[in-house]
Image (cartoon, rainbow, N blue to C red):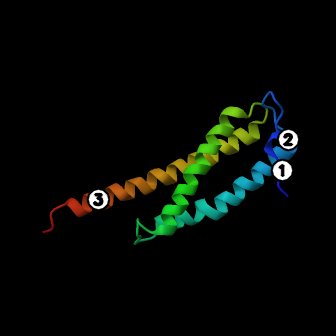
Amino acid sequence: SAVKVETLIHRDGRVKLEYTEKFITEINQLIARFLKPTREVLSRQRINLADKKLQKYLQILQVIQQRLVKVISEVKNDDSIVSLAIKANDCIVSTILWFNSLVKKSKSNQNSPKK
């Protein structure tokens, strides 16, 4: 049941209830489908940072994050959407930073002299 987003947002940036419900459902699905598995992989004792699935999920999360930023700046009348978007955005950003710090750590481990 594809609904055009334009039909759920008034011209002045106010959103209709259907938009709120759709947004909340989609965010929960995206978190379950991409964010949780990514964080689970990053939590493992041993991980392959070049893993194709991990890389793909991180790319998807970056796209979602860009959309969330758009929602945060565009939605004017629904604090629940904005606060959910901010929370989801923060989780995604922290996950990406976590991945980046693991990459940095593994590079510095590779470059450190072996005893």
Q: Are marks 1 and 2 in contact (CB under 8 Å)?
A: yes
Q: Residues within 10 Å of mark 2 (few under 14, many from 20)?
A: few
Q: Amino acid at mark 3?
A: Lys
Q: Earlier in the sequence, mark 3 or mark 1?
A: 1
Residue at 74 percent across and 42 percent down: it is 81
Residue 108's place in the image compared with 9, above or below, is: below
Q: Residues within 10 Å of mark 3 (few under 14, many from 20)?
A: few
Image quarter (top left, top right, bottom left or bottom right) of the N terminus: bottom right
Q: Of residues 67 and 111, which is closer to you in this image?
A: 67
Q: Which residue is mark 3?
A: 107
Q: Secondary structure at mark 3?
A: helix
Q: Are marks 3 and 1 in contact (CB under 8 Å)?
A: no
Q: Gap in Å between the C-alphas at discs 3 and 2?
A: 48 Å
- From the top left corner, tell me how far across and down residue 50 is, in percent: 41, 66
Q: Amino acid at mark 2?
A: Thr
- From the top left corner, tell me how far across and down residue 96 is, in percent: 48, 52
Q: Gap in Å between the C-alphas at discs 1 and 2?
A: 8 Å
Q: Of residues 107 and 7, which is closer to you in this image?
A: 7
Residue 100's disc number: none
- From the top left corner, tell me how far across and down residue 38 is, in percent: 54, 63
Residue 7's disc number: 2
Q: Are marks 3 and 2 in contact (CB under 8 Å)?
A: no
Q: Of residues 71 and 87, which is closer to you in this image?
A: 71
Give the left or right position of residue 32, taking residue 7 as reference: left
Q: Which residue is mark 1?
A: 3
Q: Secondary structure at mark 1?
A: loop
Residue 21's place in the image compared with 51, above or below, is: above
Nearer the observer: mark 3 or 2; the answer is 2
Q: Amino acid at mark 1?
A: Val
Which residue sits furthest bottom? 46
Residue at 38 percent across and 58 percent down: it is 102
